[in-house]
Image: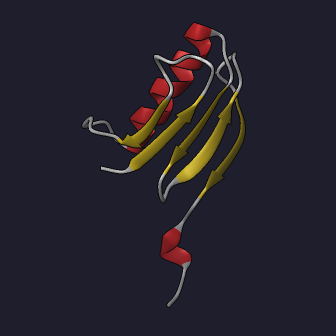
Amino acid sequence: MRHVKIICSEPSLAFDGKWKGKETPQEIVEYVIAKARELDIPVHLEIEGLGIWSIAPNGKVMKGALFDYTRIKS
């Protein structure tokens, strides 16, 4: 379970905590994009260790930053 933060103006979608569902991170991103379109609101999504996405009301990802920890050498 990863820490997920969803920041938006809709209380039913906003979330900050451990994601308890069985969805993959990709499925979480797809779900949030679909909800942004449905609710016509901008959404900010963070998935711990994976990335940050800013999603427009039309579902378009305006900004994304993916983290690849496999490239970090100790």
In the current view of this chain or complex, which residue is farthest to the right?
62
In the current view of this chain or complex, which residue is farthest to the bottom?
74
Q: Quadrant of residue 57?
A: top right
Could you tell whether 23 is left or right of 58 in the image?
left
Q: Quadrant of residue 17?
A: top left
Could you tell whether 50 is left or right of 61 in the image?
left
User: According to the image, what is the colour scheme of the structure?
Assistant: secondary structure
> Which of 69 and 42 lies nearest the eye of the viewer?
42
Q: Position of residue 10 (x, y in %)?
A: 56, 16
Q: Position of residue 46 (x, y in %)?
A: 55, 45
Q: Is residue 4 above or below residue 50?
A: above
Q: Position of residue 66 (x, y in %)?
A: 60, 55
Residue at 56 percent of width and 24 percent of height: 33
Q: Is residue 62 above or below residue 37?
A: below
Q: Position of residue 53 (x, y in %)?
A: 63, 41
Could you tell whether 58 is left or right of 7 in the image?
right
Residue at 48 percent of width and 59 percent of height: 49
Residue at 59 percent of width and 9 percent of height: 39
Could you tell whether 68 is left or right of 12 in the image?
right
Q: Quadrant of residue 72?
A: bottom right
How many labels were placed on the picture?
0
